[in-house]
Image (tube, rainbow, N blue to C red):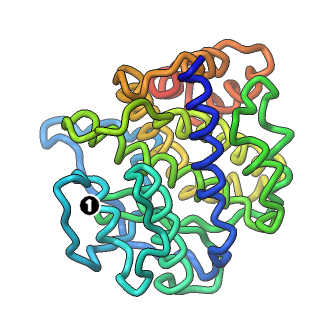
Amino acid sequence: MRRAALARSFVVAVALVAACTGDPPPSGGDAATAPDGGGSPDAPAVPQPGDGVVWTTWDDVQARANPAWGADLTDIANHLPSSYGNQYWDDDPITAGHETSHGIHAHLRVHVHEGTERVNAFYVLGDRAAYVVEPGIRKSAIATHVPPSLRGPRYALYITGQVAWDDTPLYIWDEWNAYVNGAEVGVDLATNGLWTRGWRDAVMGPLEFNVYALATAKAVAAGDPTYFASNTQFKEFLAWNLRRSMDLFRAGRTLPDFAWDDQDEHYAKLRTSADAEALRAFTRETFGAAWTMDVMGY
């Protein structure tokens, strides 16, 4: 019971901080650098969904250091210009990673990106960011594609809430990527013996937002089918970040400080609930049955 109470209080606290209504909406176009190369010199790997993301290089803009931050929070902290001061910072390292990611996203899409199309920007650590053009749907269209059984504790705040962002459906992906980056920080600290803050809802956010990210794509396929069929970057980043997020969830769910029955039940519903079958089928149709089983487990 105490863990459940802590979970509810932490989810609400982080969600309220992470709503980020003050960030400016996306603007600009879809300019980016070429994707990373790769493959074995003996037998090139068969391209997988997510391999084709077009990455933009975004190097460090600061040189901050604190041994208690770990590598991933240090990375995130040093990719936000110093002119923002402590606007996005927080004493909690996971929240600091989440909120600072929002700051980086906003800076990239508003001040760095060049072009005329409206885009959103997603920084994924390691000096890499992805720009994705906003699709032609409303954020409010996403709600009907989220199965009732998978409407988690953040659903009301982000999916049916935040109405000021209704013309910006990739606001949901902005939040998704911030939760994934926050999980990167938490898992990095915990696996390296640097996490000292006790139990935390660290990897439920990425798991919950995987559903909302897929529901966003399903809403786009229904409401802007031309965009969905032609915008490779949209689908490639979705696949890439789903894999990253599920890897973090699987790593974090086994850590004592991040284990939680509720998130295991949520994952079981994603894989088995009858009302989630349309979302599972959409994932298979988009990325293939083998990839979907390997990454999502269904």
Picture coordinates of residue 254, whole percent (x, y): 36, 20
Q: Is residue 6 left or right of residue 269?
A: left
Q: Quadrant of residue 197?
A: top left
Q: Is residue 120 above or below residue 261?
A: below
- Quadrant of the image for the C terminus? top right
Q: Nearer the viewer, residue 180 or 240?
A: 180
Give the amino acid at mark 1: Thr
Q: Quadrant of residue 96?
A: bottom left
Q: Residue at x 35, y 21 (%)?
A: 256
Picture coordinates of residue 25, whole percent (x, y): 67, 75
Q: Residue at x 49, y 78 (%)?
A: 107
Residue matched to label 1: 74
Q: Quadrant of residue 106?
A: bottom right
SS class of the residue under badge 1?
helix
Picture coordinates of residue 77, whole percent (x, y): 33, 66
- Quadrant of the image for the N terminus? top right
Q: Nearer the viewer, residue 108 or 137?
A: 108
